[in-house]
Image (cartoon, helix red, strand yellow):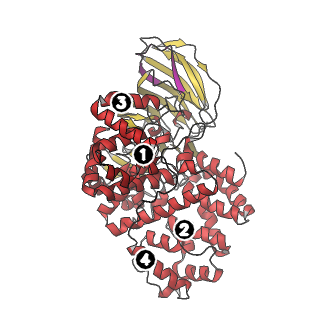
Amino acid sequence: MTKRLAFVLFAAAFAACNNTETQKEQTIEKAVDKHTQSNADVVDVKHLSLDVKVDFDAKQIAGSATWSIENPKHADTLKLDTYDLTIDSVKVDGSLVQHSKGEFKKYLGTVLNIPIEDNSEKVTVYYKTGEGATALQWMEPQQTLSKKHPFLYTQSEAIYARSWIPSPDGPGIRFSYDARVQVPNDLIALMSATNPQQKNDSGIYRFEMEIPVPAYLMALGVGDVEFRAIDERTGVYADPALIDKAHNEFAEVGQMVHTAEELYGAYRWGRYDILVLPSGFPLGGMENPRLTFATPTIISGDRSLVNLIAHELAHSWSGNLVTNHTWNDFWLNEGFTVYFERRLTEKMTDKSYADMLWELGYQDLEYTVNEMQEEDNMKDSHLKIDLAGREPDEGLTDIAYEKGALFLKLIENTVGREKMDKFLNSYFDEHAFQTITTEEFIAYLQEHLIKGDEALAQKINIDAWVYGPGIPENATRADMERFEKVNAEREKFLSGTAPAELNTKGWTTHEWLHFLRKMPKPLDDTKMTALDKEYDFTHSNNSEIADLWYIMAVATKYKPAYASMEGFLVKVGRRKFLTPLYSEMMETGQTETAKSIYEKARSNYHPLAQGTLDALILNKQ
């Protein structure tokens, strides 16, 4: 037993014999969030009233943010996070006060200092956003599918809410909010709150989120979209040119919510709707409460990529309901969500289907760990990591997602599914609408599942998973039944069997991904041509398959795919696809091709994607 694990066991025993709330408060007090300059640990920030106007001509959000506060510790200053915001004025309880701003800090932005009294209740900040607002992507009409109206959406995770709202911007700080948002009359506004289902004549929309949420779950979308109901509590918003396809693709989402509830308890957020964003969205999805933001790249026509929605829905329990206290604890958000997503997918399909997702995730994790090993950066392969002084997005890797999920899968396999589900139901219920640290979770795990069973503790080996590098030796691998059949067909092809003679009938997206992932790289041009002639991968409507095929094409310099690849890169802004594809070009000496395409495509990409690709392609840090 290591010293760290011994300490955790002692902490759990102490908590069981003493006041657990006191122990929890002590743990949280020590877990200082290094990515916020706010003092929400001193001043209680209860509620936000937002009143803003969205100006597409100026590409600016302007208005006021009024914070309802309590000051039990007699602080003389309220500190809020800002990033490239112009602060016009500040009022405290209706009276103008002299505010000040600190020095700009890399990643963190500039702290806003506001003088307050013991009895101060309302703090109003009048402000406008700047050109460097990382959270905002302003899209021209031609960058949307219908090409008639502009579009704006926000991406506040991890610490970008401060670039459009002066706020205490940390995952451990929760507040309720209401909002009044004015937009052009021909557009509709939507938020992570109660939402309208059709446009009004005034262009003024009001929102309410009565459940406290952290700033990274603040979200706003403005554009020309239509709503279509799926069932009584689920629906989809999308570009008018896409609404029919989107509604068909997500037809099973209502049932998905019911199935999730059967696993881990009631859905506590009221409605669950989806907003399909323009293709420049940098992520697969964002779990904004009540309104998941989703990439159009998951609309394949056969519902084969909708497990991404299962992931975002699962966040309604892991992440939104129970939130990581700091970004160092990010695995508590994403690891739990991947595990939940796979369990949900299995319940809606079957075990063999979910096993394919587990195996593809394991392959992704292996690749990430190998990269970290090559870069001598194995500390970032721990589940609990240290992101102090760094951009918290650096922690958004397969370690948090796949290693975190594998850790929970190991626990399930060790204690049994029935015990695991009982444990998780209690975990979600007892920590609902709260934040939690890694150490608190371990103590809870020890107290409620391991219960002093030393043999069980050794089988799980918490220390190796949470504070150790790489993939621990006791990691479990999924059943390879369906992928073994894929392996056999790949080997036949590589041995000379024509693609038309391969047994690929009934293959899902995931079987095709495994088939292509394990091909030699580069694959010779003759075999690339044969595959493309039979399956037309170059013109695939499935973004996952297309991206992988284009990477293979770049490695082989298979020119027939280049025109379609360029069209894909100009249209799609999802970093999951962009980074590997541009990286392959850079690594294979096709730098000029990468630069030429990027020059055409860059304006369609979100600032987060631009930052990643500027560093990769243009050597801009």
- Seen at 36% across and 45% down, the residue is 197
Residue type, mark 3 in image? Gln
Question: Which of the two discs, 3 and 2, sits closer to the camera?
Answer: 3
User: Are the residues flagged by discs 3 and 4 in contact, CB closer than 8 Å?
Assistant: no
The reply, left or right, for residue 307 in relation to residue 526 is left
Foreground mark, 2 or 1? 1
Residues at marks 2 and 1, CA–CA distance in whole angstroms: 29 Å
Whether the magenta-drawn stretch holds residue 77 is answered as: yes
Instruction: Tell me which amino acid carries mark 1.
Output: Asn
Task: Give residue 487's position: percent from left, percent from top.
Answer: 47, 78
Residue at numbered disc 2? 546
Q: Is residue 556 left or right of residue 479?
A: right
Q: Earlier in the sequence, mark 1 or mark 4?
A: 1
Q: CA distance from mark 1 to mark 4?
A: 32 Å
Residue 611 visible at all: yes
Q: Is the Cβ of the residue at disc 2 closer than 8 Å to that at disc 1? A: no
| Pointer 4 residue | 484
Mark 3, secondary structure of its residue: helix
Mark 3 or mark 1, which is nearer to you? 3
Q: Which residue does the numbered mark 3 point to in the structure image? A: 23
Question: Dot 3 surroundings within 10 Å: few (below 14), some, or many (20 or more)?
Answer: some
Q: Earlier in the sequence, mark 4 or mark 2?
A: 4
Q: CA distance from mark 3 to mark 4?
A: 49 Å
Q: Quadrant of residue 252?
A: bottom left
Give the mark, 3 or 1, whose residue is nearer the N terminus: 3
Give the extent of the magenta segment.
66-80
Circle 4 packing at 10 Å, graded few (<14), some (14-19), many (20+), is few
